Image: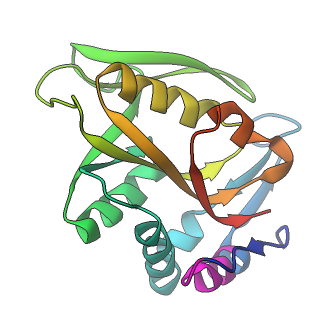
Amino acid sequence: MGTPAVIDPARPTGESAGAAVERLTRWCDDFPVSGVRFADLTPVFADAAGYRSVLDGLVAVAGDVDLVAGLDARGFLLAGGVALRLGTGVLAVRKAGKLPPPVHGREYVLEYGTARLEIPAAGIDLTGRRILLVDDVLATGGTLRAATELLESAGAVVPAAAVVLEIVALAGRAALGGRPCHSLVQV
């Protein structure tokens, strides 16, 4: 089974999301490299009730935003659903090499290597737009920090990030430099 979940009682939908995450998360030891324990939330998203409760929880913490940005790739599944419910647009924050130029990019360090995130540099004006950043898991915080810095460098305002699952022992929140981050479930 998985690691027991700590459910945030302040979230009206957190208990349902927490129960679904606890029941359906698939934990994979030594993936993608030895020593890493990967939290696979795709079974949660494949379960209609679980996915719905997760979206409800993310919408509840969204605040006043103009756009929802999802991180490649599971964040796309979340951001699209949240944006649809909020009546906003959605932006895919992509891994390097997936978008045609010109792009804005930001390199960062993962717990098991380095990577780069990109967004279009043309066709979408992000200046002054309030963007909720959404992803599935907060681990070391490098990806969320890089995405926030990338969006801000393009002129956006990122009032908060929201994740489904936070792995507290990895202290990813510290990497966010005090920026607000809502997690539906903490393990």
Quarter residue 21 falls in: bottom right
The N terminus sits in image quarter = bottom right
Q: Residue at x 41, y 61 (%)?
A: 62
Q: Residue at x 41, y 39 (%)?
A: 158
Where residue 15 appears, x then y in whole percent? Answer: 65, 84
Total numbered circles:
0
> Magenta stretch: residue 124 in it?
no
Q: Name the one closer to the observer, 15 or 114.
A: 15
Quarter residue 121 falls in: top left
Q: Name the one closer to the observer, 21 or 182.
A: 182
Q: Residue at x 63, y 52 (%)?
A: 137
Where residue 44 appears, x then y in whole percent? Answer: 57, 72
Q: Is residue 169 above or below residue 15?
A: above
Residue 88 as seen in the image, left or right of residue 158: left
The C terminus sits in image quarter = bottom right
Residue 82 as seen in the image, left or right of residue 117: left
Quarter residue 8 falls in: bottom right
What color scheme is it? rainbow
Q: Residue at x 22, y 31 (%)?
A: 126
Q: Name the one closer to the observer, 15 or 107.
A: 15
Residue 36 as seen in the image, left or right of residue 154: right
> Magenta stretch: residue 14 in it?
yes
The magenta region covers 11-21
Residue 74 as seen in the image, left or right of residue 173: left
Q: Is residue 12 above or below residue 106?
A: below
Q: Main secondary structure of the magenta part?
A: helix
Q: Is residue 104 above or below residue 89?
A: above
Where residue 100 appears, x then y in whole percent? Answer: 22, 19
